[in-house]
Image (spheres, rainbow, N blue to C red):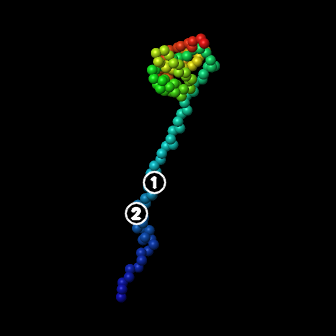
Amino acid sequence: NAVTTPPPKPEARRAKTAEQPQTSPRPVPVATRAAPAKPKPPVRHALPPSGGDYFVQAGAFRDRAHADKLAARINRLGWSTRIVPKQGHLYAVWVGPRATRNLARTLQETLQQRMNLKGFIVKKPAS
C-alpha cells in the first residue's frame, strides 16, 4: 500500500503565493538621443540701397588666396566684397559700397564688433 499525499488545497497555494512579495517588472531603460540641432542660417544684414563710393577696407594681403578667404568669410555673413589689386602686389578686401561716409562708418563698427576686423574707410577713386 502506497501512501499518497493529497494535492494541496487551492487556498494553501494562495497562501504560499501571498507570502512571496509582489514585484512589478522593472522598466528597461531605453537609450534616447536628442534630435540633432538644426544649423542656424547665416545672419543676413540689411543692406542700404546699393551704390555709393564708400567702402571699408577689411584687410590687404600679398597672397590673393588670403584675400579670397577673408572675402568669403565676410560674404557668408551677408556683406558684399570686392578684391582690389593695389600697388606693391597687394590685394585689398573692400566691403560695401555705402552711399555715405556715415553709412560706411556704421559698417566699419559692425565689422569690428561681429568679426573683430579693424577696417578703415576708403573712397572709390573717380572713374
**Residue corresponding to mark 2:** 20
Say whether residue 110 is visible.
no
Question: Mark 1 belongs to which amino acid?
Answer: Pro
Give residue 125's position: percent from left, percent from top.
Answer: 57, 12
Q: Residue at x 38, y 82 (%)?
A: 4
Q: How crowded is mark 2: few (under 14 residues within 10 Å), some or many (20 or more)?
A: few
Say whether residue 27 is visible.
yes
Q: State the mark number for residue 27.
A: 1
Which quadrant of the figure has residue 79?
Answer: top right
Question: Mark 2 belongs to which amino acid?
Answer: Gln
Q: Residue at x 41, y 79 (%)?
A: 6
Label 2 to label 1: alpha-carbon separation: 21 Å
Query: Closest to the observer: 48 or 92?
Result: 92
Q: Which residue is drawn at 44% across and 68% down?
A: 14
Q: Residue at x 58, y 18 (%)?
A: 97
Query: Closest to the observer: 87 or 123?
Result: 87
| Circle 2 SS class | loop
Give above or below for 105 relative to 65. above
Give above or below for 118 relative to 4. above
The quarter of the picture where the N terminus appears is bottom left
Give residue 49's position: percent from left, percent from top.
Answer: 63, 19
Whether residue 2 sits left or right of residue 67 in the image: it is: left
| Circle 1 SS class | loop
Whether residue 12 sits left or right of residue 100 in the image: it is: left
